[in-house]
Structure formats: structure tokens, C-alpha cells
Image: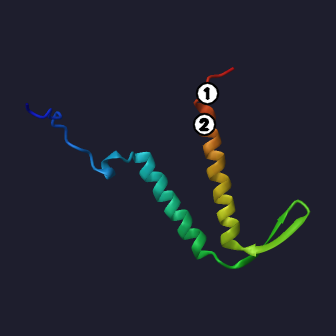
Amino acid sequence: MHAKTDSAQPRQSLLAKVSTGQWLALVFVVLALIFVVSNRGRVNIEFLLVTVTSPMWLILLIMFLIGLLTGALLTRRKGRAPR
């Protein structure tokens, strides 16, 4: 008895499976991280009646994460059927 052979399909490399949008997102994340790391000084942030002194990288990182969360929520919402 002969072993069953799979049809000869070339395997795609991991890099070929990544879409253009994913590459672009990766570039933006790397640029954002470089920007965050290069801005490490302490700053005063005023929001409503509160003033906070914090390293700039922490504020930038928080704002970046808020942007990611907002984008994820908006993208998720587009997929749903209108009511």
C-alpha cells in the first residue's frame, strides 16, 4: 500500500502572509515607539482641574494606547449589522 501523498502546493513564507495594511501598522507602531523613547523629559499635564507631572514617554504611551483602543472599538463596530 502506498502512503497517501498531499497535493504539491508551495508553502507561503510568513512574510508573504502579512498584508500591506499589517506592514503599514507595524511601521507606525515602530515609529510611535521611537518617538516615545526619544521624548523622556518630565512634563506637566493639565486635564480639567488636575495637574500631573510625569515623564513624557509615559504620557505618550498612554495616548498611543488610547488611540489603539479607539481604533479597535471603531473597527469592531463597523463589522456589525445596523439596527
Q: Residue at x 89, y 65 (%)?
A: 50
Residue 6, image x and y in percent?
18, 35
Q: Residue furthest left?
A: 1
- Name the disc covering residue 76, or none: 2
Residue that numbered label 1 is attached to: 80
Q: Residue furthest right?
A: 49
Residue 68, image x and y in percent?
62, 51
Residue 59, image x and y in percent?
71, 67
Disc 2 crowd, CA 10 A, few/some/many (<14, 14-19, 20+): few
Q: Residue at x 46, y 58 (%)?
A: 27
The N terminus, quarter of image: top left
Disc 1 crowd, CA 10 A, few/some/many (<14, 14-19, 20+): few
Residue 43, image x and y in percent?
75, 75
The foreground one among 37 and 17 is 17
Contact, mark 2 vs mark 1 (Cβ under 8 Å): yes
> Residue 28 vs residue 67: left or right?
left
